[in-house]
Structures are given as C-alpha cells and as structure tokens.
Image: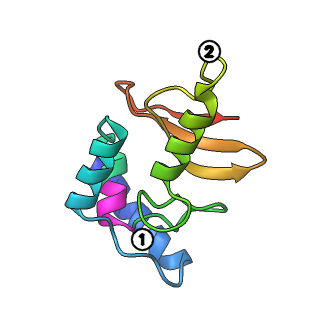
C-alpha cells in the first residue's frame, strides 16, 4: 500500500469517528518538534500529523498531539527520557517516540531511528 493511500484511509476513518479533530500540524511545527527531539519523524508519521490532525484520533485511545498544550508526544518523550536518565541505564531508548498512551504505563511508540520505523508496545 502506498503511504498516500494509507493517509487518506486514516483521514476518512478519523473524520467519520471524531466529532472535532484538532487542526493539522504545520510543517513549521513538525520542524520545531524534530529540532527539539534531535531526530526526524518517519515520513508516514509526519504525514499523519500534517494531513489528518495533530493527534486526537484513533480506534480506542487516541494519537497524542505532536506539540501543544497538555500531554503531547514531545512532552511524553522528554518526560520518559528524563525520568530514565538516573541510575546509569536509561529504560526509555533514544529515538523511540511515544505516540499513544494505552494506560497503565504502556505506550505505542515509534522507533524513529530504525529504518522501518517499527511501532512498539513499550511498558
């Protein structure tokens, strides 16, 4: 499946199941997030944030906004990396961006350093 087709399918589903989606992230917001994180987002994730919405959609739990007020993918990444920095062995790996909070300390996260941008269940 081509990325563009997948983005269109996600956008259609998000629009059909959400009453009010947040505005999509701008290219400038994505660039600012990447500069703050110190790594690039995978192309599919970038397109979802820029073409569907800045989070707020999903089947049960919802995609975290990339940036903005409240809990975001950026704030959760910084929080997990900071909390895991003490003690010598960080438990939250660099470049693994939490994109969805499943509750009970579990995240869906994207390995932004991996060539295939694998989505991981991280607890």
User: Extreme top residue here?
Assistant: 88
- On screen, 84 above or below 79? above
Q: Please state the total of marks drawn on the protein image.
A: 2
Coordinates of residue 115 in the picture (x, y in percent): 34, 24
Quarter of the picture holding the C terminus: top right
User: Extreme bottom residue here?
Assistant: 19
- The answer for how far apart the CA atoms under marks 2 and 1 are is 45 Å
The reply, left or right, for residue 90 in relation to residue 96 is: right
**Disc assigned to residue 12:** 1
Residue 1 visible here = no
**Disc assigned to residue 65:** none
Coordinates of residue 30 in the picture (x, y in percent): 28, 54
In this figure, which residue is indicated by the disc labeled 2?
88
Q: Which residue is drawn at 32% across and 35% down?
A: 38
User: Does the magenta run of residues contain 52?
Assistant: yes
Q: Residue at x 43, y 31 (%)?
A: 95
Q: Which contiguous range is marked in magenta?
A: 47-53
């Amino acid at each position: 499946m081509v990325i563009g087709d997948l983005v269109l399918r996600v956008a259609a589903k998000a629009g059909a199941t959400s009453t009010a989606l947040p505005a999509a992230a701008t290219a400038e917001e994505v660039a600012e997030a990447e500069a703050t994180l110190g790594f690039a987002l995978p192309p599919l994730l970038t397109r979802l944030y820029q073409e569907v919405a800045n989070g707020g959609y999903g089947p049960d739990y919802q995609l975290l906004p990339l940036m903005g007020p409240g809990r975001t993918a950026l704030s959760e990444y910084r929080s997990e990396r900071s909390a895991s920095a003490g003690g010598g062995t960080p438990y939250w790996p660099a470049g693994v961006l939490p994109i969805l909070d499943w509750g009970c300390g579990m995240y869906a996260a994207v390995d932004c350093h991996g060539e295939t941008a694998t989505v991981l269940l991280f607890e």
